[in-house]
Amino acid sequence: MSAARWERYARGGFRRVPGWLTPLAALEFAHLMRAQQESGIRGPVCEVGAHLGRTFILLHLLARDDEFSAAFDLFELQDVRVGRTRKRRLGEYLAKHGGDARRVSLIDCDSTTLTPQAVRAACHGAPRMFSIDAGRSADALASDLALGAGSICPGGIVSITDYFQEGWPEVSEGACRFMRENGKLVPLAIGGNKFFFTDTAQHAESYRDVLAAAFGNEARSSRIFGAPVLLIREPSLRTRLARTRLWRALRGTTIGNRIRNIGVRGR
């Protein structure tokens, strides 16, 4: 893992790759994967529904230099010409942002036909991060969650996208069906249009502690599916401004004090 590469990507490089990933979600992935490394949890990373790689590239950059990355998508199964173009463009974006193509596999498949054994074989091991952003039907989402639950290593994490998006009610339906009928995942955190799960309550608690320390007042505890979960909100405009280089340069100056006073009066 090169800190410089993934930090550049997480801080804005991902915006140059078509797809769906929020700045908050990028930071959540980074904190969780770094916590895994500090705990000695090893394994490849993978994404079901990689599209052009906006999230997948981040996961790859966060992986160790000896960890494999696999992207599963319909690609050429959906349309040969379009699929080949998508795979080529994903490879180009990966190279542009410092990825290592030797540790990457782009696999044409319908994820609902995969087995955990097939995932582990394609990934060269049990994934520690399993991102789901594929089919939006309830059946597909429930199937993908079951696949992730059966594939990850101890301490591995599964994420889904669009659980609370009003345009995709099938996602929450599929997740609820999985949790009712299978339930082999434990809720961990929700934020940035991502819902994170892991394999045990102990791992979930450890990851929540990491995220709570990282996000401070932007995180609060709640419950879902009968278990604790951390809710992480997007930082306010004032908070985002305070983190910029521009504000650090202006802080304490006459102009900076005027801006601060305007903010206080505008509350």
Image: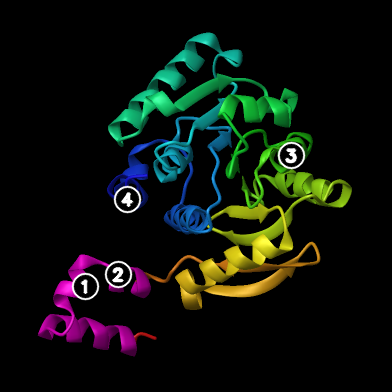
Q: Main secondary structure of the magenta part?
A: helix
Q: Is 253 above or below relative to 16?
A: below
Q: Are marks 3 and 2 in contact (CB under 8 Å)?
A: no
User: Which residue is pictured at 39% across the width and 41% down the height?
Assistant: 61
Image position, residue 202 (x, y; %): 69, 64
In the image, which residues are magenta?
A: 238-265
User: Which residue is pictured at 33% across the width and 39% down the height?
Assistant: 16
Name the side, left or right, on which 7 lies relative to 74.
Answer: left
Closer to the chain start, of discs 4 and 1, is 4
Q: Which mark is residue 61?
A: none
Residue type at the position of mark 2: Arg
- Label 3 secondary element: helix
Q: Which residue corresponds to mark 4?
A: 3
Number of residues whose C-alpha sits closer than 10 Å to that of mark 4, classed few (under 14), some (14–19) or many (20 or more):
few
Q: Is 110 above or below relative to 177?
A: above
Can residue 201 be found in the magenta stretch?
A: no
Q: Which residue corresponds to mark 1?
A: 247
Separation of marks 3 and 2 at Cα, in angstroms = 39 Å
Closer to the chain start, of discs 1 and 3, is 3
Number of residues whose C-alpha sits closer than 10 Å to that of mark 1, classed few (under 14), some (14–19) or many (20 or more):
some
Outermost residue on the left side: it is: 254
In the depicted view, which residue is nearer to us: 133 or 226? 226
Closer to the chain start, of discs 4 and 3, is 4
Closer to the chain start, of discs 3 and 2, is 3
In the depicted view, which residue is nearer to us: 211 or 90? 211
Residue type at the position of mark 1: Trp
Q: Are marks 2 and 1 in contact (CB under 8 Å)?
A: yes
Separation of marks 4 and 1 at Cα, in angstroms = 24 Å
Q: Which residue corresponds to mark 3?
A: 150
